[in-house]
Amino acid sequence: MKNLFTPIIFLLISAFAPLDYLQAQCSPGNAQTDLKVNNVKARLRNTGDIWWDGTTGMYVVPYTETSNVSALFTGALWLSGYTPGGALRLAAPTYGAQFSQFDYWPGPLSPSTGEVTTAECNNWNKFFQVNRTEINAFQNDFADNGVLDDPIPPSILGWPAKGNPFFAQVNGYDLPFGEEMAPYYDRNENDKYEPHLGDVPLLKGDVSIWWVYNDNGNFHADSGGEPLKMEIQANAFSYNTQDDPDSAYIDNSTFYEFKLKYRGDQPLANAYFSLWVDPDLGCYQDDYIGCLPDHNMAFVYNGDTFDETCVGINGYGSEIPVLGMKVIKPFSYLDNDNVEQVLPFSSFTYYLNAGGALGIPYSDPDLPNEYYNYMTGKWRDGTPFSKGGNGYNPGAPAYPYAFDNSDNNGQAWTECTITGDPDDRRFLMNFGPINVFPGEEYEFVYAVMFWPNQPYPCPDLENYVEDGDSLVAFYNWVSEEINNIPQPSGVSQAPFEQSLIKVFPNPMDQGSWFYVKGDRAPIRDLTLTNIEGQVVRRYENVQQTSLLMERNGLPSGAYFYQALLEDGTVSTGKLILQ
C-alpha cells in the first residue's frame, strides 16, 4: 500500500458534526465487484470511490489471470455548490475508506425529501449485472414466436427498472415507486419494465454493471463537507472485440455512465462537478500528467524510461503504457425548453501526495473550501493556476489547464518540457459553474483508455486523440443501436464478429474505391457512419458476397461499418481513410 496523506482533521470532524448532517445513520457500503471482460480488470465499489479495494489499486491492465500491475489507484465524482445562504455543500471522497470515513452510501434518495433510510442503504448495498450471452438468448427466445418459452434469468427478471413487478420477488425489497432507475427497452411503451412481456435491460458492452448511491446517508467524514442530497445512478461496462487489431482501443477501455438526480430543496449556486483521479501508473512515485482540453482528455504517463517496482507496488518495467481519461459526454442537462445544455470543461488541476517536495500549497485538500478551490481552477491556498512551470505563480494571470500541451514561450507546456520531478499526483477534470435547481438531472459519461508499451521518454499525447474520437463515435453508435430492439428473428445482437467481414484497403491511403467481402454469408445491408454517428453510406438489399464502396469525397478520418449478413449475423468494424 502506498503512503497516503490523510489530514487528522478528517478523523476529528465527525465528533463535532451538526445534528442536521445526520439525517440518516447508514452504514458504509461494502459491496465490491470486478468488471473484467476484455484486457482490463476494474474494481467497482458502491461507496463512490472505484478502482481500488479500499487499500490497493485494482485497475489491472493488461489483465490476465496472473497479472497484477495496476494503472490507477482510485477515483470518484466530486460535487459542490453554495446554498442561497452561502453554505458550501460538498461531496469529495478520497482515501477515507481506509479509516471507515465516507461521503457516499448505497441506495436512492426520496424524490420528495432527499432522505434515505438505514434499511434502504442496506438493501441497495449491491450491484446488478447483465451480460450479452443472457440478453441474446432472452431476445432470441422472444423473437421466434413472441413468447418467452425458457425461464427468465434472475439478472433480467430482477433488473432494477421502473415498475418491475418481479423486483421484490427476486431481490427481497421494493423499488422506489414510479421512479426511473436502471435503463431498459420498453417494448409496448407503457412506461414500466415487464420482462415477462419481452422488456429487456438496455445492455451496453458485453457485461454491464449498474448500481445506485447517494451523499445523504450519513455525515461526510471523508471530506468534512455538508451533504448536497444528490442521488447517483452508475453504469460501468466494457467490450471484448475478440482481439480484432483494429479495435484494440476498445479492448483496452472501460466505460462509465452516471445520472445525477438533485433531491435538495433549495438551489445551489456556482456548482461544479469534477472527475477526481489518483492515477498510479504502476509505481506511483514517478508519474507525469497532462491534458488536452479541446479533446476532453487527461493523461498519466511515466516520468522516466523505466517504471520500477516501488514500496511493494509492481511497476511496468521497460514496457511502459500511457493511460487516458476521455470524457465522452460532459455533465449535461435539459433546460426549460428541453434543449440539452453541456457544462464546459472549465479547468484541469492537480496536486501532490502530501505536497511532495513542493510543500503545502500543492498538497491534499483538508477543509471543504480547499476541495472547492481545486474544483474551480485554484490551488489549495486559493491561488489561481497559471501557465508555465508547475502552474503555481502567485500574481500571474490565471490559466485553468495545467500541462495542456499549449505553446509556452515556444515550447509545448508539459511536465516533460519543464523537467519536473516525477511524483505521486492526483488530478481533477472540472466542469462548471452551473446553478443547480431542485429536481434537475445531469448525465456524465467517460471512458478510461490504455495504450500499452509506448515510446519513452515523453510520449506525444496528441498521438492518442484519434483513438479518443473513435471511442466517442463507437459509444454514440452503440447508444443508437440498442434502441433497435426487437431484432428480426435469428439476428444476433453480438456487436463484434469482424472475422465475418473483410474491408480492404484498410487503412485506405489513396484511391476512390474500397472493397467489402462477407466471408460467411452474402451481405444483406451495410451502413457506414462517421465519428459523429452520421450515416454517410447506406446499401440495402445487396444480396452479394462482396461490395465495392466508393470513397467519393469522404474526408479523412475514422468510420464505422455495420453489415447485416443473409444468415442473420451482424458484423461491425472500423475503417480508416487517410
Image (tube, rainbow, N blue to C red):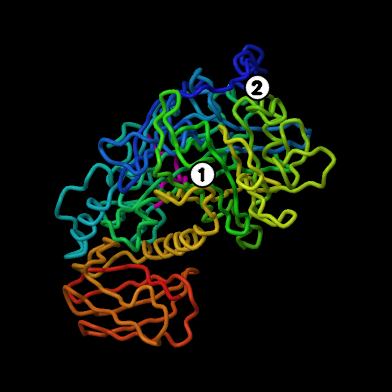
Q: State the residue at coordinates (36%, 77%).
A: 527
Mark 2: which secondary structure? helix
Disc marking residue 20: 2
Viewer-closest of 217 and 43: 43
Left or right of residue 353: residue 514: left
Magenta run includes residue 217: no
| Residue 405 in picture, x, y percent from top left | 64, 54
Q: Main secondary structure of the magenta part?
A: loop
| Residue 38 in picture, x, y percent from top left | 31, 48
User: Is residue 507 depicted above or below 289 in this figure?
Assistant: below
Q: Which residues are magenta?
A: 174-183
| Residue 320 in picture, x, y percent from top left | 43, 44
Reading the image, the residue beneath label 1 is: 301
Viewer-closest of 21 and 134: 134
How many neighbours does mark 1 have within 10 angstroms: few (below 14), some (14-19), or many (20 or more)?
A: many
Left or right of residue 446: residue 249: left
